[in-house]
Image: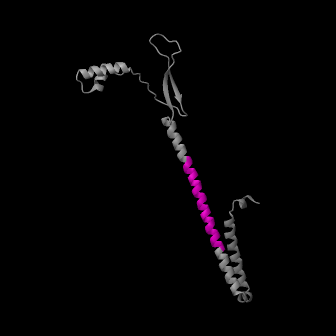
């Protein structure tokens, strides 16, 4: 079977066959006048039947082609959406995260820590910032600010312990 035939749908072939049969029937009717007069009813039924068969086959083929096109469009849209999600995740880090861990088993100089930043996830993280926070010192500053009657405790904390 030639390659082009394997791509033709059965309904397309039926519709084309019905058109060819109608053309042959029309040629026979125009050439054989006596035979046509004897078989009027059969010829009329043949024309109607072939026309209906071709019509139905063409509609079924068109609806199948429309469904195939919709399926292909849905697959392309899904691929584009997935690519967009991947691009956003690659830019923003997606569901990746990191955390800091202090390793107490490694020896360090006095007053220093061995701090590790550990990354989990598929996507890279950018512009990761670490803040070190002494909760006891912040509590003491906040308590002093409240004793002094300050209404903006955060502002007072920033004055006494500015971020650097």
Relative to 152, 21 lies left or right: right
Quarter of the rendering occupied by the C terminus: top left
Does the image show residue 57?
Answer: yes
In this view, 104 is above or below 84: above
Q: Is residue 35 highlighted in magenta?
A: no
Q: Position of residue 64 (x, y in %)?
A: 62, 62
Structure colour scheme: one colour
Residue at point 60% right, 64% down? 63
Span colored in magenta? 53-79
- Front residue of 12/20: it is 12
Residue at the extreme right of the image, as rendered? 1
Q: Is residue 64 highlighted in magenta?
A: yes
Quadrant in which residue 66 is drawn: bottom right
Residue at point 52% right, 40% down? 87
Residue at point 71% right, 77% down? 24
Relative to 93, 12 lies left or right: right
Quadrant in which residue 138 is drawn: top left
Q: Position of residue 77 (x, y in %)?
A: 54, 50
């Amino acid at each position: 079977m030639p390659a082009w035939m394997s791509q033709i749908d059965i309904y397309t072939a039926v519709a084309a066959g019905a058109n060819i049969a109608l053309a042959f029937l029309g040629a026979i009717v125009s050439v054989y006048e006596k035979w046509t007069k004897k078989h009027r009813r059969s010829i009329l039924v043949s024309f109607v039947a072939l026309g209906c068969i071709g019509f139905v086959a063409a509609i079924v083929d068109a609806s199948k082609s429309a469904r195939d096109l919709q399926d292909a469009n849905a697959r392309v849209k899904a691929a584009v959406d997935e690519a967009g999600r991947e691009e956003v995740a690659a830019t923003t880090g997606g569901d990746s995260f990191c955390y800091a861990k202090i390793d107490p088993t490694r020896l360090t100089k006095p007053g220093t820590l061995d701090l590790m930043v550990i990354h989990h996830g598929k996507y890279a993280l950018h512009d990761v910032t670490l803040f070190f926070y002494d909760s006891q010192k912040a509590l003491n500053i906040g308590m002093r600010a409240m004793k002094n009657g300050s209404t903006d405790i955060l502002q007072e904390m920033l004055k006494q312990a500015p971020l650097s």
